[in-house]
């Protein structure tokens, strides 16, 4: 035993655990994730995106220096910042914690870090919607998917593709009474039989029933869900992963979320790390500026 080995052995005995130089996750990054295709499944939040009328619209404005009462400016301060008056935490692409409906269950800041990366399943109901614009995912659709692709992995995230999001950001979307949904039976099957982590859908509600029965069942049984998901037509039905990020507001009853699909290297959509300028990021010939008509910064 050489000097280094003796030290590692002694140290592991001292702390009661095995010391390892395991770099298998780094190897996974180099061999798979570095070559993967990345697809953003997230809507951009602006002051005018569709939102339930019961919440109202949000407002963006330049952040104000409380001493001078003037907005910060690149020319005199070296930076600018933005003030967000967000009407709700149910805005845009979301991660709904069960605390949204059931206060005895976790809020957004209490969701465990283990949500970070999961297998992604995409089940399409696009064809069914051609016959019925109010179609909701059924157990038979899930079983049909499994007959073609195999069992849904335990702990997976299941996103329901409807192409509803292709009309985004049409404000009329938030007023629709008929829209694609997920049936209560399908939700129970996915959670109780397939033991998924959570499901997601493109519309801003789980279903079109008068009582939102699907969302009510989810929340009151401790399940989270994703809403307002986008670009599911650019993701394979099986074989991808999903990266899950969200704001961590204390006691938050909703979450502004970012979902990124990590797809196989030979997938036809998405971008790879090698073809993206990340550090440093590219300089634009159109600097950010405040656009009063848009109510936000634009280029």
Image (spheres, grey):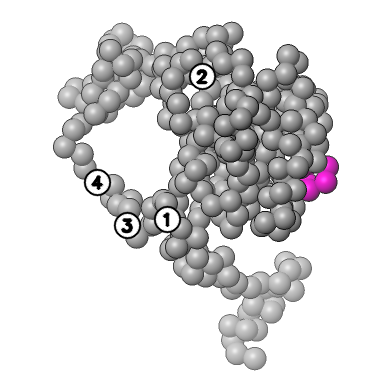
Q: Which residue is mark 4?
A: 282
What secondary structure is marked by label 2?
Answer: helix
Between marks 1 and 3 in the image, the one whose residue lies nearer the viewer? 1
Circles 3, 2 touching at the beta carbon (< 8 Å)? no
Mark 2 neighbour class, 10 Å CA radius: few under 14, some 14 to 19, many 20 or more: many
Q: CA distance from mark 4 to mark 1?
A: 24 Å
Between marks 3 and 4 in the image, the one whose residue lies nearer the viewer? 3
Comes first in the chain, label 1 or label 3 = 1
Comes first in the chain, label 3 or label 4 = 3
Q: Which residue is mark 1?
A: 268
In the rendered structure, find residue 173 and report the number of the disc placed on it.
Answer: 2
What secondary structure is marked by label 3?
Answer: helix
Q: Is residue 98 magenta-colored?
A: no
Q: Which residue is mark 3?
A: 275
Drawn side of residue 34 relative to residue 14, left or right: left
Drawn side of residue 43 relative to residue 221, left or right: left
**Is residue 233 something one can see in this rendering?**
yes
Q: Which residues are magenta?
A: 190-195
In this rendering, the count of numbered labels is 4
- Give me the residue at 32% from left, 57% from top: 275
């Amino acid at each position: 035993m050489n000097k280094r080995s003796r030290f590692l052995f002694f140290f592991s005995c001292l702390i009661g655990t095995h010391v390892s130089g395991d770099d298998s996750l780094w190897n996974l990054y180099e061999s798979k994730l570095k070559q993967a295709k990345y697809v953003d499944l997230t809507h951009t939040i602006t002051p005018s995106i569709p939102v339930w009328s019961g919440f109202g619209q949000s407002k963006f404005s330049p952040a104000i220096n409380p001493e001078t009462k003037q907005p910060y400016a690149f020319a005199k301060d070296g930076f600018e910042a933005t003030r967000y008056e967000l009407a709700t935490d149910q805005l845009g692409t979301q991660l709904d914690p069960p605390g949204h409906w059931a206060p005895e269950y976790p809020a957004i800041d209490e969701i465990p870090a283990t949500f970070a990366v999961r297998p992604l399943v995409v089940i399409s109901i696009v064809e069914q919607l051609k016959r019925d614009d109010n179609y909701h995912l059924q157990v038979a659709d899930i079983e049909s998917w499994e007959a073609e692709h195999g069992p849904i992995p335990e702990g997976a995230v299941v996103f329901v593709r409807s192409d509803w999001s292709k009309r985004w950001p049409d404000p009329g979307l938030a007023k629709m009474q008929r829209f694609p949904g997920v049936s209560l039976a399908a939700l129970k099957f996915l959670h109780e039989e397939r033991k998924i982590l959570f499901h997601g859908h493109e519309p801003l509600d789980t279903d079109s029933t008068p009582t939102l029965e699907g969302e009510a069942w989810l929340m009151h049984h401790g399940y989270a869900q994703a809403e307002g998901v986008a670009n599911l037509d650019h993701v394979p039905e099986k074989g991808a992963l999903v990266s899950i990020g969200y704001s961590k507001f204390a006691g938050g009853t909703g979450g502004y979320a970012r979902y990124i699909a990590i797809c196989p290297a030979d997938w036809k959509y998405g971008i790879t790390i090698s073809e993206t300028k990340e550090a440093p990021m590219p300089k634009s010939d159109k600097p950010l500026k405040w656009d009063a008509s848009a109510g936000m910064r634009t280029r």
